[in-house]
Amino acid sequence: MSSGAPPAPVQAAGSPPPLQALLVEAFAAGPLQGNGAAVVRLEQPAAESWMQALAASFNQSETAFLLPLGGGAWALRWFTPSCEVPLCGHATLAAALALGHWGELAPGAELTLHSRSGGLRVQLHPRQSPDGGPVGVSLDLPSGGLTVHQTPTYLAEVLGAEPLAYWGSALGYRVALLPDGFPLAALAGVAEQLQGPDRLGLVLMQGLAGLSPLQRPAVLGHGADYQLRFFAPGLGIAEDPVTGSAHALVAPWWCVQLGRERVVGWQCSQRRGGMQCEVPAPGLVRLTGTGHLLWDGRVDAGNGAAGGPWGPCDWSVCHGG
């Protein structure tokens, strides 16, 4: 029996080389926490059907695809296992960490990723610890504001309590405010009971004013001001562990309620995590969190889209406006 290194895999003649890919646990303080996102580095535009099939194979909440545009610019798109989405916070954090890991984004530097939601500024923070601890990232996401809606009649029965308020949003998410003492972390069986627009994204949130500083979960040394959970079975996600776009949506409301320029949000899912949130400009939220690189390698996904070769995709929809 040989004890040497295993032979390199043989690449079929005429097939494209494997692509760089990695898996990041986003908004996590360490391994096996936060929200998983695969990141794939494309060398040319890829067919949407191929990207969707690869996202289904990864089976993470989101898979991010980065395409170099030249001159140090990058386009970014996000796919759940079942569909493409217009915005994803945790996979944007993962994309920034991937670019840093690949030597395309230096610590302390920032760049704008071009996406279907416009230009998204990201900044990679210098590593605070030489022992390989989590790396920090700041990212700016759009926040469209909340619009008061009537609470669906079925929702109180699903939750076991009447929401204090209920909103809609341009992002398509619905948001319900629950009492501070409501057992949000222990809530079970929500996703399969959601109806109508709630299936495309329901944020359940509550304040943490009733907890002492020692009882509150901490993010980057600061105690959380609110916590939430996010369900989107209509997007192929029963529950998303830590959802940057949801925090970007509700953080401005919490800033107003608490009279603060910066708040800390926590997500009390089984794979918990959180982020600091501030509003640098109207309609914009800056999220700061950390991520953990779980694995790094290459993906050999054949010759392109499932059922066909690589093909062009309209990446012009990724704009920096």
Image: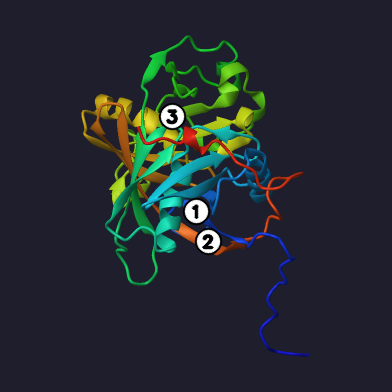
Q: Which mark is residue 294?
A: 2
Can you tell which quarter of the image residue 108 is in?
bottom left
Q: CA distance from mark 2 to mark 3?
A: 29 Å
Q: Amino acid at mark 3?
A: Met
* Amino acid identity at mark 2: Leu
Above or below residue 3? Residue 289 is above
Nearest the camera: 45 or 29? 45
Label 1: element kind: strand
Where is residue 24? Give x, y as percent: 50, 55
Query: 183 above or below 58?
Result: above
**Sequence-first tag of 1 and 3:** 1
Q: Residue at x 60, y 14 (%)?
A: 154
- Give the mark nearer the N terminus: 2 vs 1: 1
Disc 3 element: strand
Relative vertical location of residue 198 with respect to residue 49 in this rendering, above or below: above
> Mark 2 vs mark 3: which is more N-terminal?
3
- Secondary structure category for the residue under label 2: strand
Camera-side mark, 2 or 3: 2
The image's mark for residue 205 is 3
Neighbour tally class for label 1: few under 14, some 14-19, many 20 plus, Cα within 10 Å: many
Q: Position of residue 51 (x, y in %)?
A: 62, 44
Q: Which residue is mark 1?
A: 25
Query: Is mark 2 in CB contact (under 8 Å) with mark 1?
Result: yes
